[in-house]
Image: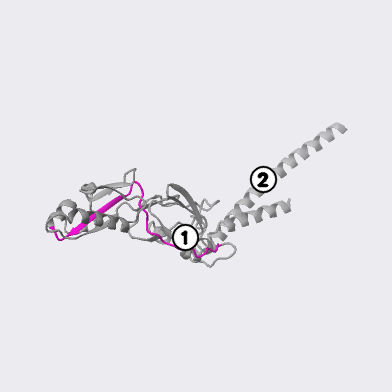
Amino acid sequence: MIKLRNIFFLAIVAWALSSCVTARKVNYMQEPDRYIPHYADTLSYEDYQLRIGDRLYVYVYSLDEKVMEMYNAGGQSSNMRYQSGNIGGSYDLYTYLIDDDGNIDFPTIGKQYVRGKTTREVKRLLEDELSKLLSELPGYSTVSVEVNIVNRSFSIIGAQSGRYSINKEKMTIFEALALVGDLAEFNSRKEIKIVREIEGVTTIKTFDVRSKDIVNSEFYYIEPNDIIYIRQIPGYSFGINSASTALGVTAATISFGVFIYTLVQTGINHVNKYYGAGKSTSGEGGAQ
């Protein structure tokens, strides 16, 4: 029985200590080793390729005020409305939806296929088409076009769940996590998953964000419409984030275990004593 009690206590201590959230489990930029993976230098950022359902903000610049009025829904002199995010109720007037065929329908030049193109390529496409059309008009003035994506966002599930806007050209995984307030202590940094659609094919990428090598890898930049899944560390239902807390929990658990063990052992002793006394009395009566 003594050996069983010792094993029980050791199991409790091991469980409590394993529940401790160490710096190794939560710190970023750690050197790769046998537990933290090394990632090959595969960093390569490519401009986002437009997809069905994206919305483009298009602004046409020209010295001709009539051209400005015709293409810019009232002749706004700048794109400050887009930059400040105050498109408001006129959202559809300032943006163009990429339809199921991959086209946008732009005034005077009609449908233009933009799926799979970058915003820079769409800019050149619209400038060329508008120049061909407007060059035939008297007093022709060259035009310049600005193109931006207005619905760039990513989603996080499993921790701080929600949909968040991408407010810059390139956003890193660390910037994305900072945007949602970083991860909680009991969110796993070891196996972060990104669900990403590429050319109509959905892929799932898994990586350890603690590794210092992450900054040189294909996982460093996120893309619009990415879904980032962050799971809880298995087996953690409450937090132990310091050695003193772990020792306190261990001591309390052992005390409770000793109490339960003593209570059970006392009950067993009483039962044995009762049945022992009963057998003794029965034996004496039979002898008489």
Question: Who's the residue at 16% across and 60% down the image?
Answer: 141
Q: Nearer the viewer, residue 23 or 80?
A: 80
Colour scheme in use: one colour
Q: Secondary structure at mark 2?
A: helix
Give the x, y percent position of residue 23.
52, 64
Earlier sequence position, callout 1 versus callout 2:
1
What is the quadrant of residue 38 in the picture? Answer: bottom right
Q: Residue furthest right?
A: 287
Q: Nearer the viewer, residue 228 or 143?
A: 143
Query: Which amino acid, by three-letter code, is at mark 2?
Result: Val
Is 157 placed left or right of 32 in the picture? left
- Is 56 contained in the magenta span? yes
Q: Residue furthest front?
A: 136
Label 1, residues with CA under 10 Å away: few <14, some 14-19, many ≥20: some
- Is 147 contained in the magenta span? no
Question: Who's the residue at 62% across and 57% down the image?
Answer: 14
Question: Who's the residue at 19% across and 60% down the image?
Answer: 142
Residue wearing tag 1: 218
Give the x, y percent position of residue 249.
56, 56
- Mark identifier at residue 264: 2
Query: Which amino acid, by three-letter code, is at mark 1?
Result: Glu
The mark lying in front, picked from 1 and 2, is: 1
Q: Secondary structure at mark 1?
A: loop
In this rendering, does residue 151 appear at all? Answer: yes
Give the x, y percent position of residue 165.
34, 54
- Mark identifier at residue 97: none
Q: Main secondary structure of the magenta part?
A: loop
Q: Is residue 287 above or below residue 151?
A: above
Magenta stretch bounds: 36-64
Q: Nearer the viewer, residue 241 or 53?
A: 53
In this rendering, does residue 85 appear at all? Answer: no
